[in-house]
């Protein structure tokens, strides 16, 4: 788990916490509160002064990979969380595809499975660096070819769940090794067009389509045990082709479709099984967008508003307001995977 010092700063520099303790640099000799010549040493800081940063959230950039733009895309885009500008090209996937799922480690983004055309799906897991725009490399495979599936991330592993309308499979793959994913239990209901959220200990899937109609189901599964997911409440509306975002304590589900597109943003607590509450709206009605998560805000990029769009929306985790425009992707697209760094 990533940690940062939230209140213990010396000359604007923070130490890193480990094993339940924080560390900060402190001058051994001071005079009337002013630093004088002396030695630096480490000082333990109580855990209460630490702010936990979830491994799936980013502080710097959001990424959108793959998608459909009128043709199937292999483009990886990067956009800054801090500024409203057009995204830049960040290399390419090994395989053009859309209806993909995204996972994030501390250093790399992953794009799993997806539709490659001619009524064929892929099982490929791609990995790309968050700090180098050299493009993706093959990182193994999920257990079966699927599209329109959901992605979740723990600190060590990526998860791909559902897809293809009839799949309830949850796959797990290690960020550290290039191997075929292993079965990690099942969703409570098989479905496609769903989205994923992640807490520090559990993965969530919300919405989707188990049959001809959309569902409002929110599922929860443990990152550490291979069991069937349990019901974790419901969205405020049944929706599919939704985008997912995660704060440290809450999951968000944005946009979607069920006979007509939605602009609703729902919020649900990771800690309690209750119906999600309305958390404002996207700037436009939209389906098939990709979700990205910073430590303070959620982003929805691309999607279909009646035509495929390049708009990036931003909304605050702390206030229930309509999302604002946060620039554009480099190309219009829907069905892309969202990741963050």
Image (cartoon, helix red, strand yellow):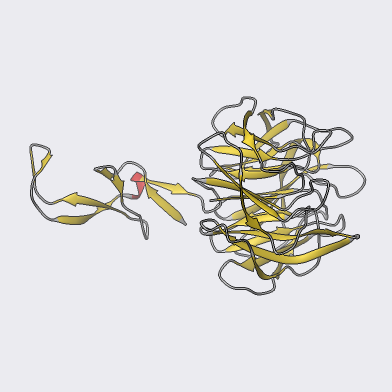
Image quarter of residue 51: top left
Residue 98 drawn at (x, y percent): 78, 53
Q: How many marks?
A: 0
Q: Which residue sits at x=76%, y=55%?
A: 149
Q: Which residue sits at x=87%, y=54%?
A: 165
Extreme top residue here? 321
Residue 141 drawn at (x, y percent): 72, 70
Between 119 and 35, the residue placed more toward the observer is 119
Q: Does residue 10 appear to the left or right of 334 in the view shown?
A: left
Between 247 and 326, the residue placed more toward the observer is 326
Residue 226 visible in the shown view: no
Q: Which residue sits at x=86%, y=50%?
A: 210
Compared to 51, does 168 lie above or below? below
Compared to 139, does 305 lie above or below? above
Q: Which residue sits at x=50%, y=37%?
A: 82
Extreme right residue here? 212
Q: Does residue 205 appear to the left or right of 164 in the view shown?
A: left
Residue 241 drawn at (x, y percent): 79, 43
Between 144 and 206, the residue placed more toward the observer is 144
């Amino acid at each position: 788990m990533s940690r940062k010092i939230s209140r213990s700063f010396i000359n604007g520099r923070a130490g890193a916490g480990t094993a339940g303790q924080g560390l900060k640099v402190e001058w051994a000799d001071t005079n009337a509160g002013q630093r004088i010549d002396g030695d630096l040493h480490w000082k333990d800081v109580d855990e209460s002064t630490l702010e936990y940063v979830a491994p799936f959230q980013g502080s710097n950039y959001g990424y959108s990979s793959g998608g459909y733009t009128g043709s199937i895309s292999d483009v990886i885009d990067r956009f800054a969380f801090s500024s409203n500008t057009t995204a830049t090209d960040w290399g390419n996937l090994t395989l053009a595809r859309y209806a993909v799922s995204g996972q994030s480690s501390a250093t790399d983004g992953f794009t799993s499975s997806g539709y490659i055309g001619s009524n064929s799906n892929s099982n490929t897991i791609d990995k790309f660096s968050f700090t180098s725009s050299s493009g993706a490399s093959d990182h193994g495979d999920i257990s079966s070819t699927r599209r329109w599936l959901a992605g979740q991330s723990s600190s060590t592993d990526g998860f791909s769940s559902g897809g293809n309308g009839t799949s309830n499979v949850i796959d797990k793959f290690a960020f550290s090794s290039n191997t075929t994913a292993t079965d990690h239990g099942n969703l409570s209901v098989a479905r496609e067009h769903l989205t994923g959220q992640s807490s520090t200990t559990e993965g969530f899937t919300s919405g989707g389509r188990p049959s001809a109609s959309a569902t409002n189901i929110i599922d929860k599964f443990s990152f550490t045990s291979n069991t069937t997911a349990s019901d974790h409440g419901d969205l405020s509306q049944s929706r599919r082709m939704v985008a997912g975002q995660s704060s440290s304590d809450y999951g968000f589900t944005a946009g979607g479709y069920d006979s007509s597109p939605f602009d609703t943003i729902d919020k649900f607590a990771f800690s309690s099984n209750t119906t999600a509450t309305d958390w404002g709206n996207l700037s436009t009605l939209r389906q098939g967008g990709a979700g990205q998560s910073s430590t303070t805000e959620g982003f929805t990029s691309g999607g279909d508003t009646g035509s495929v769009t390049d708009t990036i929306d931003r909304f605050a985790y702390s206030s229930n307001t309509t999302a604002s425009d946060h620039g554009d992707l480099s190309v219009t697209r829907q069905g892309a995977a969202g990741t963050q760094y």
